[in-house]
Image: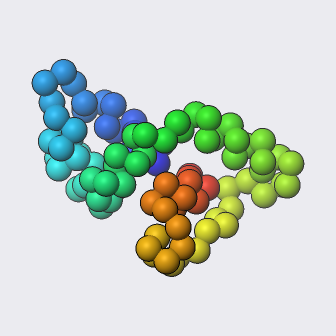
Amino acid sequence: MQRIIEVYKRHKLPGVSTAYVYRTHIFPEFHISIATLYIYLATPISRELKQMASAGSATGTTGTWTGSTASTASTGSATDTAKRQLQLF
């Protein structure tokens, strides 16, 4: 997620649309939907990383996957899925 945001910020210049950055840089490399990109952009990544680090140090399980591979329609919102995916990075 952090790499996707870095690529987005590198290519998002004044006058360049988010859709253009998505089509030319994000999708070809990461193969995510534009909806997922918008979820990632709306997520406060630094705060999420700090929370994961503090939770991981308390439990001793940093960088482990705790989510499932089920679709968001049956397990929760897209934001919940994005938060679980953060734990992969």
Task: Report the front residue among 73 and 32.
Answer: 73
Left or right? Give the position of 64 relative to 26. right
Q: Residue at x 29, y 59 (%)?
A: 33
Q: How many marks?
A: 0
Q: Residue 6: horizontal and vertical position, in percent?
A: 39, 36
User: Is residue 78 visible in the rendered structure shown here?
Assistant: yes
Task: Report the front residue among 70 and 89.
Answer: 70
Q: Residue 46: horizontal and vertical position, in percent?
A: 58, 34
**Position above or below: 59 against 9:** below
The quarter of the picture where residue 3 lies is top left
Q: Residue at x 68, y 62 (%)?
A: 64
Q: Residue at x 54, y 73 (%)?
A: 75
Q: Residue 48: horizontal and vertical position, in percent?
A: 61, 41
**Position above or below: 6 against 84:** above
Q: Residue 50: horizontal and vertical position, in percent?
A: 68, 37
User: Is residue 82 visible in the rendered structure shown here?
Assistant: no
The quarter of the picture where residue 14 lies is top left
Left or right? Give the position of 52 relative to 40. right
**Position above or below: 56 against 33:** above
Q: Residue furthest top?
A: 14
What coloring was used for the rendering?
rainbow
Left or right? Give the position of 40 relative to 13. right
**Position above or below: 85 against 26:** below
Q: Residue at x 27, y 49 (%)?
A: 26
